[in-house]
Image (cartoon, rainbow, N blue to C red):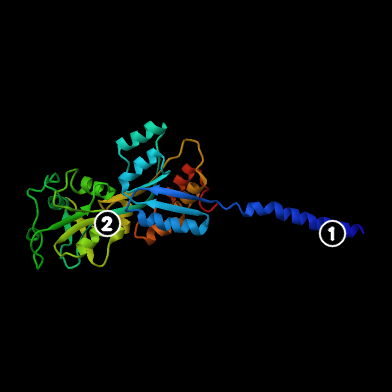
C-alpha cells in the first residue's frame, strides 16, 4: 500500500514539474525590429533578418532602405532603434541626436566594404589615378588635374570613342558622400553625372553602355562590368581585393555601421539583442562574406559584444 502511494506521488510530482516547465518552453522571444537606413546594406540586413527568423520564429525584421542619410533622423525621432549606415554620422547628425536624448548613439562596425570604379566589360581601361578620376566626375579638379576629361580618347586607345558617360549614386547615399570626399578631394560632382538610387542601378547602367563609367559598392560587381584599379602618386596600383580592403591598403575602403539608440547602462531590448548577437557572431560574419563584403576580425567582434553586454563568443 505504501509503495503504491509513493508511486502515485512520484507521478504527481513529474506532472507538476512538466506543467511548471511548459511556460518556459513557450517563452520564445517575439517582436519586430524596424530599421531605416543604407541601401548599400539592404541585402546584408535582409539576410541577417532571414537568419534571425530561422533562429527565433517569432522575430521579424522590417527594412526601409532609403539611404544612409535617412538613418539619423529616424533614430532621433525614435522610429527605429537601429540604423544601418555606409558612412559615419556627421557632427550635425550626432548633435541632433544628443540634443534630443542627452547621450550619443552607439556606433557598431559590422563589416568592411570598398567603393570600386567600374567600366563596361569590353572597355580596356585597367587603372586610373585620383586626378584622372576627379577630372572625369568633377569640374573643380581639386585633386590636381589640369583639365576636365570628357572623352575616352584622353584615356585609352581603341574602339571605345566619344564622350565619357559618368554614373553615380544620389545625394542621400553614403556611397555618394564617400566618393565625393575621397575621389573628388571634397569637390563637387559635375552636373552631367547620372544619379541612381542604388549601386545595382549604377552597375546596370555601365554594363549597358561601353562609353560609361561609374562607382559602386564592391559586392555589386557583375559579369557585365570590370573594376578599375587605383594608382597612387608613386604609380603603385591598388586593386579592391579582400586582403587590401581589410588592411586599408585599397584607398576607397569603408566601415559599414549600425547605429544603436542605447541609453547608458541600459540593457538592449530583446529583439535588438538577438539581432546584434547574430550580426556580431561567426554565423553573421559568414553572411557578410557570402554577400561579397569583408568580415571583421574576431577581436573586433569580441570588443563590440563586450560593449553591448553580449556573451563572449564560444561561451
Q: Specify whether 8 is left or right of 88.
A: right
Q: Nearer the viewer, residue 55 or 227?
A: 55
Residue shown at 50% from the left, 59% from the top: 54
Q: Nearer the viewer, residue 244 or 1?
A: 1
Q: Specify whether 82 is left or right of 70.
A: right
The image shows residue 95 at horizontal and vertical percentages of 34, 33
Query: Could you tell me which quadrant the N terminus lies in?
Result: bottom right
Q: Specify whether 20 is left or right of 171.
A: right
Question: Is residue 236 something one can see in this rendering?
Answer: no
Tag 2 residue: 199
The image shows residue 127 at horizontal and vertical percentages of 17, 59
Residue shown at 32% from the left, 47% from the top: 68
Q: Nearer the viewer, residue 216 or 19?
A: 19
Kindly check if marks 1 and 2 are in contact, taking CB atoms under 8 A apart as contact: no
Q: Specify whether 35 is left or right of 230.
A: right
Mark 1 packing: few (<14 Cα in 10 Å), some, or many (20+)? few
Residue 7 numbered tag: 1
Q: Quadrant of residue 99?
A: top left
Whichever of labels 1 and 2 marks the residue nearer the N terminus, that label is 1
Look at the picture and state if 206 lies above or below 274: below
Amino acid at each position: 500500500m505504501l509503495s503504491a502511494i509513493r508511486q502515485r506521488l512520484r507521478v504527481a510530482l513529474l506532472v507538476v514539474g512538466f506543467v511548471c516547465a511548459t511556460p518556459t518552453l513557450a517563452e520564445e522571444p517575439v517582436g519586430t525590429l524596424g530599421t531605416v537606413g543604407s541601401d548599400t546594406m539592404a541585402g546584408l540586413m535582409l539576410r541577417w533578418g532571414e537568419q534571425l527568423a530561422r533562429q527565433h520564429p517569432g522575430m521579424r525584421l522590417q527594412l526601409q532602405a532609403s539611404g544612409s542619410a535617412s538613418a539619423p533622423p529616424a533614430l532621433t525621432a525614435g522610429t527605429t532603434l537601429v540604423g544601418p549606415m555606409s558612412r559615419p554620422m556627421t557632427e550635425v547628425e550626432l548633435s541632433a541626436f544628443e540634443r534630443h536624448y542627452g547621450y550619443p548613439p552607439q556606433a557598431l562596425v559590422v563589416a568592411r566594404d570598398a567603393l570600386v570604379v567600374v567600366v563596361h566589360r569590353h572597355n580596356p581601361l585597367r587603372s586610373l589615378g585620383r586626378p584622372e578620376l576627379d577630372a572625369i566626375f568633377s569640374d573643380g579638379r581639386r585633386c590636381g588635374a589640369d583639365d576636365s576629361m570628357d572623352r575616352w580618347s584622353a584615356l585609352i586607345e581603341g574602339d571605345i570613342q566619344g564622350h565619357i558617360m559618368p554614373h553615380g549614386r544620389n545625394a542621400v547615399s553614403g556611397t555618394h558622400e564617400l566618393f565625393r570626399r575621397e575621389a573628388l578631394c571634397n569637390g563637387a560632382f559635375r552636373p552631367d553625372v547620372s544619379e541612381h538610387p542604388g549601386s545595382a542601378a549604377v552597375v546596370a547602367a555601365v554594363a549597358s553602355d561601353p562609353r560609361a563609367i561609374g562607382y559602386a559598392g564592391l559586392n555589386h560587381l557583375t559579369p557585365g562590368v570590370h573594376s578599375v584599379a587605383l594608382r597612387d602618386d608613386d604609380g603603385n596600383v591598388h586593386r579592391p581585393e579582400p586582403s587590401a580592403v581589410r588592411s586599408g591598403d585599397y584607398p576607397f575602403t569603408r566601415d559599414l555601421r549600425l547605429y544603436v539608440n542605447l541609453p547608458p547602462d541600459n540593457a538592449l531590448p530583446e529583439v535588438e539583442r538577438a539581432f546584434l548577437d547574430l550580426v556580431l557572431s561567426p554565423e553573421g560574419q559568414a553572411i557578410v562574406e557570402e554577400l561579397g563584403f569583408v568580415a571583421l576580425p574576431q577581436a573586433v567582434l569580441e570588443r563590440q559584444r563586450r560593449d553591448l553586454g553580449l556573451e563572449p563568443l564560444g561561451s
